[in-house]
Amino acid sequence: MANDRGRSVEQPPLACGRGPSLRWTVSPHMSLRPTLLALQLVLAGGLAGCRDKAEVATLGGSSVETGFVPAVRAEMSPGLAPEGMAWVPGGRFWMGCDGCNLPDAVPVHPVDVNGFWIDRTPVTNQEFERFIAATGYVTVAERRLDPKEFPDLPKERLEPGSIVFSPPKRDLPYLRSLDWWRWVPGANWRQPEGPGSDLRGRANHPVVHVTYEDADAYARWAGKRVPTEAEFEWAARGGLDRKRYAWGNDLKPGGRYVANIFEGRFPTHNTAEDGYVGTSPVTAFPPNGFGLYDMGGNVWEWTSDWYRADWYARLAAAGVARNPTGPPTSLDPSHPDSPTRVIRGGSYLCSDQFCTRYLVGSRGRGEVSTGSSNLGFRLVRSGPDSIGRSQGTQ
């Protein structure tokens, strides 16, 4: 199948609970350049850092350290909170999503993390605008494609752009990602829906159309870093042990939605029972137990871990993973040529009919050079116990 930029697309098999994923095939001499290729919001896993060679025992099909007890450590904040950040104390937890029908989120395995600072909310349009004004940075979605890399493309197809959710006008007999994702020339963080759209009324909404390169550039400017997958899940759980969501086990506690997700018939009709059809202000819903907002729903968020679908199985056999930082490279069998990192949290497009990735232990994956209209980020700073850990990216 050909898309509107002259590339062929291959529709991958649809997995239960899996986010939209497009495979864009380019000629062998072309590189996977930022902005061109497809959105791959798929799901993924992190790697372990150092682990003790503790005694392990098999429990429920996975290997765990004997006597492992999940807990939040009783430790004080190491100082005044940096602006917009909250201290997350270290602790031990079961990582993953058992019983969620998500193959890359099992087996659940024990993890121990040090404390760290984390942004209370995803980075907003207002905050990202300050970064752009201070640095002159040009995001990947705003860059024109290099004709030397794509000599066969006509000039009009070298224009910058990004991936935008475009719901079909009528119900579909089946769910196929290509029916609601569209490449839109001119779409970027300033124009989320493409030319003619803007950020009026959305200053405190999460910035979108951000690639991993963009998030990392912002992090370096801010003196922070992109969180690991384990840090994100630990923070998202807010001190709760083995719950389905960042707020507990009920999707609608008290009969009300507490996160921005998709209600109605996906993808054609969002009833907006939660109050929003697209992105929402980053503090529109209650915070979790650590005082963090939007740890489930609203927008997907980048982590620094490379994606491997089999990584949890490897971790489960090795005892307690301590401050895991992800595998050395990505390996996604369905997209072997695309470098992918783990994304977390789900988005306003996640629905129980198609994508349930607002589940706190679930995972997604994103092709590093691709942004979309439901992908953003937040950042962390290491605590004093983690000074020896790398602040860079893998």
Image: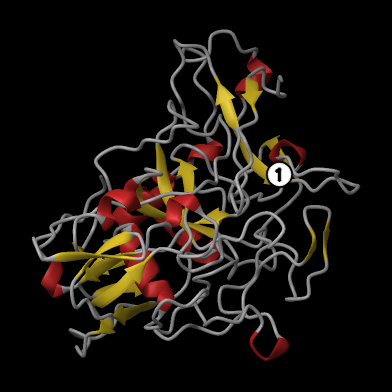
Observer able to see residue 227? no
**Left or right of residue 182: residue 131:** left
In percent of width and height, residue 173 lies at 86, 43
Observer able to see residue 176? yes
Q: Nearer the viewer, residue 264 or 137?
A: 264
- Say which residue appears at 39% left-offset and 67% top-offset: 233
**Left or right of residue 175: residue 122:** left
- Say which residue appears at 21% left-offset and 63% top-offset: 323
- Say which residue appears at 30% left-offset and 77% top-offset: 82
The quarter of the rendered structure image containing the C terminus is top left
In percent of width and height, residue 131 lies at 42, 57
- Depicted 208 relative to depicted 270: above or below: above
Number of dots carrying numbers: 1
Residue kind at label 1, given as amino acid type: Gly
- Depicted 80 relative to depicted 120: above or below: below
Q: Secondary structure at mark 1?
A: loop
Residue that label 1 marks: 194
| Residue 105 falls in image quadrant | bottom left
